[in-house]
Amino acid sequence: MNHHRSLSGYAATLLMLLALAMLGAGCKKAPVEGRDIENDARALQQFNKGVEAYVTLHSRAEKDMPHIKATNSGAAIVKRQNTLAARVQKARSKAKEGDVFTPEVSAYFRRQVDAAILGNRDGVEEALKAAAPGQQKITVNQPYPEDGPHVMMPPTILLHLPRLPELMQYDILGHDLILRDVECNLVVDVTRNVIP
């Protein structure tokens, strides 16, 4: 009987140690997941601040410019676009890659794109074939190349990315993700090798 009691005690102790080990493993995993959520939240906050700062700068550059009416000629629209682009370029004369797409923000976008593609690889890859780069060179604070493809962002990816103000959009060129001001056709920022 003592032998049976000691085996029961041993088994109970073993089960308790196993349960504690599993709980310990769970406790070690939780902070890692928490850090990913915190990193994503921090990266998203950084990105939104960068976008808001750009929108404020764009609004200041546009402040005293007359609005174009629907009846104006195409030449007047292009002239206004070029004038606005020149003002924005001057105000951002020290702009460089990574001002908006910081390393943390770029890592966040890579994770979001990977998650989007994971759910619909075939559909996304087909849509991205048109984004193959030619000889276009993308430079921050310069116009998006006229001969650059204007690939519609696959909805699967777009749903995973932060929403943008109306004056901005995402473009894809090859493996690069571009943040573009559509009102004056300027590259706001670019993050390289985000698109597989």
Image (tube, rainbow, N blue to C red):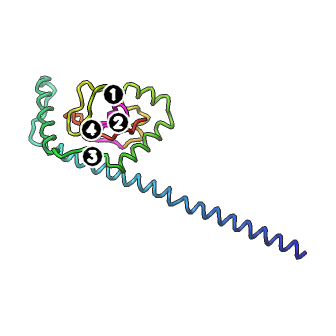
Q: Circle 1 — which element?
A: loop
Nearest to the eye among marks 2 and 3: give it.
Answer: 2
Q: Earlier in the sequence, mark 2 or mark 3?
A: 3
Q: Do the residues under discs 1 and 2 have CB atoms within 8 angstroms?
A: yes
- Which residue is the site of mark 2? 176
**Whole-number angstrom distance, CA of label 2 to CA of label 3:** 18 Å
Q: Earlier in the sequence, mark 1 or mark 4?
A: 1
Q: Do the residues under discs 3 and 4 have CB atoms within 8 angstroms?
A: yes
- Residue at x 24%, y 40% (from the top left corner): 188
Q: Circle 4 — which element?
A: strand
Looking at this view, is 122 or 168 the one in front?
122
- Which residue is the site of mark 4? 168
Q: Which mark is residue 51?
A: 3
Question: In the displayed structure, does residue 104 sit left or right of residue 139?
Answer: right
The x and y percentages for residue 118 are 50, 37
User: Mark 1, residues whose alpha carbon is within 10 Å: few (<14), some, or many (≥20)?
Assistant: some
In the rendered structure, does residue 170 fall within the stretch colored magenta?
A: yes
**Whole-number angstrom distance, CA of label 3 to CA of label 4:** 9 Å
Q: Earlier in the sequence, mark 2 or mark 4?
A: 4
Q: Please, what is the three-letter code of the amino acid marked with disc 3?
A: Val
The span shown in magenta is 162-180
Q: Do the residues under discs 1 and 3 have CB atoms within 8 angstroms?
A: no
User: Mark 4, residues whose alpha carbon is within 10 Å: few (<14), some, or many (≥20)?
Assistant: many
- Which residue is the site of mark 1? 133
Q: Circle 3 — which element?
A: helix
Nearest to the eye among marks 1 and 3: give it.
Answer: 1
Q: Earlier in the sequence, mark 1 or mark 3?
A: 3
